[in-house]
Structure formats: C-alpha cells, structure tokens
Image: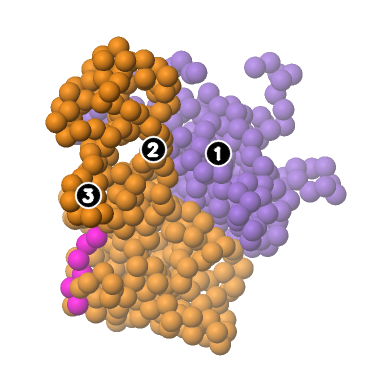
Amino acid sequence: MTEKEKTIHHNFMQKALTLAQEAYDNHEVPVGCIFVLDDDDDNERKIIGSGRNRTNETKNGIRHAELEAVDEIFTSQKYTSDVFQKCSLYVTVEPCVMCAYALRQLRIKKVYYGCANERFGGTGSVFQINQDPKLILHPPYSCEGGYYREEAIILLRKFYVRENEKAPQPKRKHQRVLKTEIK
Amino acid sequence: MDIATLPFQKVLSEEESRSLETVDVYISDVEPKETSQVLKFIQENCPQSKTLCHVKRIKKTIHSDGKGFTLSVLICLTFSISINELKLLIQKQNLDSILNPRVHQISKYPAITRTQFEEWKKLWPINFHEDPRREPNFTSEEIETLKSHMIRAINLAEMAKSCGEIAVGCIIVDSKSGKVLSESYDKRTSSKHPLRHATLNCIDELSMPERTSIPAASDFIIPNKRKAEDDDDQTYLCKGYDIFVTHEPCIMCSMALVHSRVNRVFYGRSNNLSGGLGSCYKIHTHEALNHHFKTYKGFLEDQIEMLEIDC
Ligand SMILES: [Zn+2]
Ligand SMILES: [Zn+2]
C-alpha cells in the first residue's frame, strides 16, 4: 500500500493493531479496537476509548476487546451512553455475534474492521446482526471490512501457531505452521 | 416425568421445528412379484441421491376394503432426470409393461421429532430413529430443584424492581451439585450502562466475585479453583453450569453463553424483540456455532408476568 492509498481509517486501524499486538504479547487472542468520536461540529476526531482481548487474564470468555473498550469509556465517567451515536469503532477482527448486538444497543454510528471472523462473526460471517430489520429496538449500522486485513490475519495465525506449540504433546495439532500467503 | 406435564418447554432448533417441505420424485406402482426386478433396474440405471437416505424405497398401501394392497416404488428425484429420459431407459430394458412412472411428493428432510415423523410419513414412508438424548427425562425431584432455582431468579427480579431497575433476575448454578455460584439482575438503569443485562452481569460476577454489589445470599459459593479436568480452557466459565433467568436472554447475552460454554438454560418469558434463544435467533442450536446447549422456556412464566404487570 502506498502512502497515498492510506486513509484516515487506516491510521485509526493502525492504532487498533497496536492493541492487538499488545494482546498477542500478553498471550491473548490478538484483537484490538478503538472508539473514535467524530462529532460533526468540530473536525477533530478523538479517540475516547480503546480495548483489547482479555479473556485469559480475566478467565472470562466474554471479555472481548469491544466490551473492554466500552467499559473503559463508562468507567471514565466523561461520557454518557449517547456518545456512541457519534462514534465509529475500529476493530482488527469482525465483531462476534455478542459484540455486534452490543454495538447495536449502543447505537454505534459505523464499524470498520480488518479481517472477517468466520467462526463467530456477527456483521456478515455467521449472522448480520448490524442490519437485521427484525431487530427493531435499535437502529441498524453499517460495517466495512478490509482495513489492514492481512496484518490482522497474520497476527491471529501467529497466535494459534504459538498456542499449539505450548499445548501438551497429545493435544497438539500436527504440523501447524505459520502460513504467510493470504487469499 | 411426562413431557406433557413438564413446567417448561424445550426450545427447538430450526431442524426440529420445521414444517413439512417436499421434493418431487418419480414413483410407480409395481406387482409384488416384480419388485426385485424393478429394484435391480433402479439400482443399475437410475441416478441415485444421498439426500434420499431418510425415505423408504417401497410403499405399501392397504386397500380400503381391507383385502389386498398396492406396492409403489420410489425411482429417483425428478430433477436428476427428465420423464422422457426415464421412459426411454425403461423401454431399453423392456420394462414398460411393469413400470409406469409418475410424479409424487415426499418429505425433503429427515424427521427429527416424533411429531414430524407422524405427519411427514403420510406422504411416503420415512425412516425414523428417535435420539433418546434429545428429550431428557426429569424426575419430579429434579423438577422441584429446578423450580427452586427459578424462584430464586424471580426473587432477584423482584429485588431489581424494588431498586428501580428493569425486573430481570439471573442465577448460575452448578448442574451437578446444585450450588448457586453467581447471581445478579439487570442494572441498566442505575449504571446508565446499556449493556448491564442480568445474564452478562451474572457471568462477569462469576469471573470477578469482588465486583458483586448486590446483597449476597448466605450459601453463596465463589468458584475460585476448578478441577484439573476442566482445565482445557479456563475461559469456559460456565462449563457444566445451568443458567436460570426470568426472561429470554437477548442476542448479546445468548452469544455470551456460547462463549462461556453453558450447559443448560431455563427461562420464563420469551423476548420477541431481541431474544436470542428462540424468538429472533436460535443461537443455542445454530449449526455454524461451535457450542450448542439445551434451552427450556416458559418456566414459571405466570409468576414473571405478574411481576411485569404491576411495574
Ligand atoms: Zn465479541
Ligand atoms: Zn442481554
């Protein structure tokens, strides 16, 4: 990618990737995200919260990057829940079904993600929670993938290869090696 | 205890609850003495499909006077061959005097429940093997225990209501020992946090008991250390645990239960606007997701309805 092709979304996704890397360094599934307030009144876009996966640290399978960031924003007590209507989320991996409906309840403005989440994805891969017209309690939101997709995938693959090497011998999946080519 | 008298109903999967869908096939009446010849012809000449494993090859229709019967044989799916091609094949084998194909409809899918089986076999006989694990038995003693758990969840919903919260209560119980491990209620109002649903709170409090802010019951157990056998992934927080919640969990909470590998879910009132375990989605049985669990609805529904009325 040339410098010219990079957009403001790539800049924000770069920051989400840094958090994903931090998760990886801490033996967590490498997913990171940031919430960006883009108020129409002032052109300044501001990061109001960030998070990364903490499911291992908390021993709680629901502590995904998105929920961590949302809780950080509420804990700061600087914002009320209305703030999400003016926020975009940048997350390295497509939100899962749980997070996809959490974001809908928060009335998020827009979601940008890196790579798809084939197993749990809630904004296209398994379900399309963000757009489902029968969910009338909260407005739909749009979702756009592909920002630093390859980087997000490589990080996930590195994680799974490393976990496999750590696993006791009989549990190991044979010959799990890091694939670098991306379709 | 008989299924009909259970105080809750199983929330069926898409496959278990679907109604009859049909597919067109060619069939023909045959003389009993010619069946083996006909079956040989079908096996050797007609395109066969694996999607028809659930139906029987031959149908026997007893005549209305009780004397005699007609045998019909299923040849193949209509979309695999045209009627003219089929008739040519029959002619080539000199069977046109004994085989006269016509189009007939049969059930497209195998029956999973007895109700489906009884209904769908009327079209054409189908195979049915009832899976005994599908409908587990509950003893009356178990039902009483389950009821006491649900009442505890209702009490939490009442407590929530008296605190000005949305009246939803939830508890997590060890399926084997029956010990209550975590309890919570909806806290969206007081926290001004739109995601503080009862189920999510209950899972979070199970992982971080120090966060618990509601008056804890005396037999509250904090499950700090799990046995090594459970250790393949410690983040599977609800493995071997049941959830009792007054209202059907929303899509977010339902998926949180998948991530936590819950064992069973019992709920009272359905949630038509955002329910993830039967109403809007059937997350507990969705084929694409890697963990499935049994879900029962309608448990002490009337009591919960009362709770809502005088809100
Ligand atoms: Zn998630
Ligand atoms: Zn919920």
Which residue bears the numbered disc 3? B62
Q: Colour of chain B?
A: orange
Q: Could you tell whether B295 is left or right of B138 in the image?
A: right
* Residue B222 coordinates in the image, percent (x, y): 29, 68
Query: What is the crowding at mark 3: few (fewer than 14 residues within 10 Å), some, or many (at least 20)?
Result: few
Secondary structure type for disc 3:
strand
Point 70% across, 60% down: residue:
A82
- Looking at the picture, do discs 3 and 1 lie on one chain? no
Circles 3 and 1 in contact, beta carbons < 8 Å: no
| Residue B59 against residue B98 in the figure, above or below | below
Q: Could you tell whether B48 is left or right of A30 in the image?
A: left
Secondary structure type for disc 2:
strand
Q: Colour of chain A?
A: purple
Point 68% across, 62% down: residue:
A80
Viewer-side residue, B300 vs B115: B115
Residue B95 visible? The answer is yes
Q: Main secondary structure of the magenta part?
A: loop
Q: Could you tell whether B45 is left or right of A148 in the image?
A: left
Query: What is the crowding at mark 2: few (fewer than 14 residues within 10 Å), some, or many (at least 20)?
Result: some
Point 41% across, 28% down: residue:
B78
Secondary structure type for disc 1:
loop
Magenta-highlighted residues: B134-140
Parent chain of label 2:
B
Disc number for residue A124: 1
